[in-house]
């Protein structure tokens, strides 16, 4: 092995380790998220209002946060996310409704940072070090596997903490985990948008904001990527909001061990991440070209997700709760498998079509319609029957599959990396 290759492999390992730090940080919301519904239930507060506030906050701040991430630095944005998460989990200790609302407002901001700053940092860092584009697929796959695996552990730890400390225990654990993640993030190098065009200081925040919106409006492929993300992730978030009350409402014998179920769901995500590369390779060699394999793989994942959500829609509508509990639980495991499979695919497609210079800005622009979908889905849970909402979620995934197919059959255009 040449000195250059050894140096490149060491650099790649460092980049992957840093990205795995992101996976540790991603597990932080899971440590408390498993039990957020039951915590709010014990506080006897309006749960739907709290979740709606978080999603509305995400929708309001999404168009501006991305430009701030690109302008002031992705590493700094990740640190700000960690600080916000510590504050949010501390606020969960208080049952006062106004305090919880403040936590949900901050939660909307932190969620936007979580799903834009970390990925845009990694993609830019990968290309700045000159690594081959095909290595990105492995990194995204490893990230999906690690996210699921750490979330499994987080679910088990959260259940233990709840047993020992009560409903607030998982949130105390999340504070410790966030602090650890922040220490790891401090070791990263900083990167920005627009680096190849000169100093990032020469690019104003207004220009970042306007150019990001112009790019989305002028490039139909980027617009469709954003719409697919809004539909698929919006459907996923609506499912996440619904799975606990749905299973609890079915009242199975012995109750529902939410921590254990959560860990099973996260294991399904891990399995989906493991299957990403074999699935992509299958479609790239047997069905289509290698260049179109991510697009076709995404269509497959969204169709499966749509079918999985059709199961509770039909079961809850037409069968007694005691009869269909196992079928509904199996469908929940299947959709989380699809999440694990589609997450690295979506990351690959964003890196393929979205320029590095505007990664943070455009990814947060995508979150504006995403949060609108989630707000509508969350509101629908108060108005419609659960089976009807699951039917809508199934439709969201099917629509995402149809739009994704338009990308699969179109011509591939290589994205400008700066």
Image (tube, grey):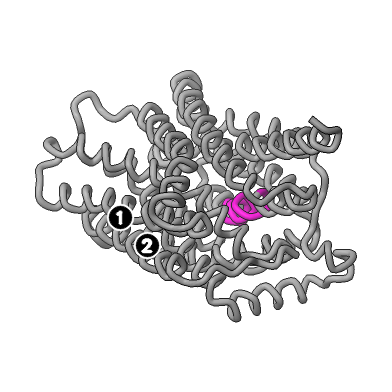
Residue identifier under label 2: 401
Q: Is residue 113 magenta?
A: yes
Residue at left offset 27%, top offset 44%: 246
**Crowd class of label 2 (few under 14; some 14 to 19; many from 20; radius 10 Å):** many
Residue drawn at x 46%, y 30% is 167
Q: Position of residue 381 (x, y in %)?
A: 31, 57
Q: Which residue: 59% across, 39% down?
A: 89
Asked if residue 61 shows in the view, the reply is no
Q: Could you tell me which secondary element the residue under label 1 belongs to?
A: helix
The nearer-to-camera label among 2 and 1 is: 2
Please tell me how crowded label 1 is: few (under 14), some (14-19), or many (20+) other residues with Cα within 10 Å: many
Residue at left 50%, top 59%? 55
Q: Quadrant of residue 205?
A: bottom right
Q: Is residue 37 above or below residue 342?
A: above
| Residue highlighted by disc 1 | 306
Is 307 or 284 nearer to us in this picture? 284
**Residue stretch rendered in magenta on the structure:** 107-118
């Amino acid at each position: 092995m040449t000195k250059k290759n050894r140096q490149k492999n060491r650099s790649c390992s460092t980049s992957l380790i840093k990205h795995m730090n992101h996976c540790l940080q991603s597990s932080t919301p899971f440590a408390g998220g498993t039990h957020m519904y039951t915590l709010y239930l014990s506080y006897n507060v309006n749960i739907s209002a709290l979740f709606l506030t978080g999603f509305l906050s995400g929708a309001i701040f999404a168009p501006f946060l991305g430009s701030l991430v690109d302008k002031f630095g992705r590493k700094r944005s990740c640190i700000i996310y960690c600080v916000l998460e510590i504050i949010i989990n501390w606020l969960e200790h208080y049952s006062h409704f106004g305090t919880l609302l403040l936590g949900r407002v901050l939660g909307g901001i932190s969620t936007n940072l979580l799903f834009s700053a970390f990925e845009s940092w990694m993609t830019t860092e990968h290309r700045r070090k000159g690594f081959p584009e095909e290595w990105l697929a492995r990194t995204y796959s490893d990230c999906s596997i690690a996210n699921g695996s750490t979330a499994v552990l987080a679910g088990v730890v959260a259940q233990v903490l709840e047993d020992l400390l009560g409903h607030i225990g998982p949130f105390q654990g999340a504070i410790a985990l966030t602090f650890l993640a922040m220490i790891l993030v401090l070791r990263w190098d900083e990167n920005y948008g627009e680096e190849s065009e000169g100093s990032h200081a020469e690019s104003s925040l207004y220009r970042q904001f306007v150019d990001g919106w112009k790019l989305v409006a002028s490039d139909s492929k980027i617009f469709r990527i954003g719409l697919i993300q809004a539909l698929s992730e919006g459907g996923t978030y609506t499912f996440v909001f619904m799975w606990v009350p749905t299973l609890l409402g079915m009242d199975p014998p012995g109750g529902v061990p939410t921590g254990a179920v959560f860990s099973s769901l996260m294991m399904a995500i891990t399995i989906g991440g493991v299957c990403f590369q074999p699935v992509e390779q299958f479609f790239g060699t047997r069905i289509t070209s290698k260049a179109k394999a991510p697009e076709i793989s995404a269509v497959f994942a969204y169709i499966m997700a749509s079918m999985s959500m059709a199961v509770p829609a039909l079961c809850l509508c037409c069968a007694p709760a005691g009869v269909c509990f196992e079928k509904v639980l199996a469908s929940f495991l299947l959709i989380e498998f699809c999440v694990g499979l589609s997450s690295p695919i979506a990351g690959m497609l964003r890196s393929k079509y979205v320029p590095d210079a505007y990664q943070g800005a455009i990814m947060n622009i995508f979150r504006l319609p995403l949060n609108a979908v989630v707000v509508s889905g969350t509101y629908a849970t108060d108005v419609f029957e659960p089976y009807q909402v699951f039917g809508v979620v199934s439709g969201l995934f099917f629509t995402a599959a149809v739009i994704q197919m338009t990308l699969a059959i179109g011509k591939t255009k290589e994205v400008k990396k700066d």
